[in-house]
Amino acid sequence: MEKRGRGQKSGLGQGPQPQSVGFKKERKTSMFEKEAYAQILRERLRESVHDVQYVEPPFDDSIADIGKEWKSDLSKLKFANSYRMEPMKKFQAHSVETKVQQILKESLKDVKYDDRGLSQLSLQLADQILLAVKEFGFHRYKFVIKVLFIQKTGQAINVASRWIWDAAWDNWVEAKHETESYVALALVFAVYCE
């Protein structure tokens, strides 16, 4: 055996270096193997902190049993802040007003004033209006909808609302349907959430 002194390097052609006993380097799994694909997908979902638009599930039947785990991993994701300070599509008051007016006209054409039955009808109208407003696709808006029925008895009425308001992005819409015996008033408030 050749002795080496301090600072001397061993030559390249001196033969194989002894390996430690019991240490075996594992082969990295291929992403093309069925089980490995599922494991890689789980690891990526666990480590991800970014916004995930769509992840294509595996098409093999053998991996279909991990569907529940895959969905639970998606639900545990933490999404990064987008730092978006304005909406992608601004609330369009005119188009919402015409849609709400149309809903009131169609829903209340044959309705008579009844103080007991109109409370349930106001809830149904509010839900119907909310679904119609959501179809417009205003991104990151929260909607508050009030539907009021006022009997006509010769009185005057004032309705007031108070909000913390961002005049640049927040807006509201009023729609009114009037008959001989009552007035139906629908208010839609759109508040942008940053």
Image (spheres, helix red, strand yellow):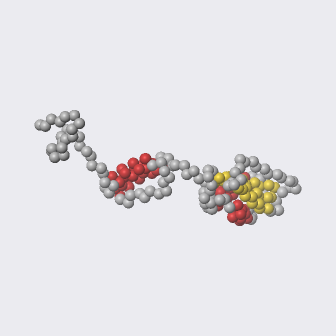
Asked where in the image residue 37 lies, by quadrant, the reply is: bottom left
* Residue farthest to the right, as pictured: 154
Identify the residue at image location x=36%, y=50%.
39
How many callouts does the rendering have? 0
Q: Is residue 63 left or right of residue 108?
A: left
Where residue 28 appears, as percent x and y from the top left, is: 30, 50
Asked where in the image residue 100 lies, by quadrant, the reply is: bottom right
Identify the residue at image location x=80%, y=62%.
179
* Residue 122 in view here: no
Q: Nearer the viewer, residue 147 or 82?
A: 82
Identify the residue at image location x=69%, y=64%.
95
Q: Nearer the viewer, residue 152 or 90?
A: 90
Q: Nearer the viewer, residue 61 or 12?
A: 12
Asked where in the image residue 16 lies, by quadrant, the reply is: top left
User: Dividing the image into 4 quarters, which one contains the N terminus?
Assistant: top left
* Residue farthest to the top, as pictured: 6
Q: Nearer the viewer, residue 11 or 96?
A: 11
Identify the residue at image location x=46%, y=50%.
74
Query: Is 16 above or below relative to 31?
Result: above
Where residue 176 appears, as percent x and y from the top left, is: 77, 60
* Residue 180 in view here: yes
Where residue 84 appears, as percent x and y from the top left, is: 59, 53
Where residue 43 appears, as percent x and y from the top left, is: 39, 48
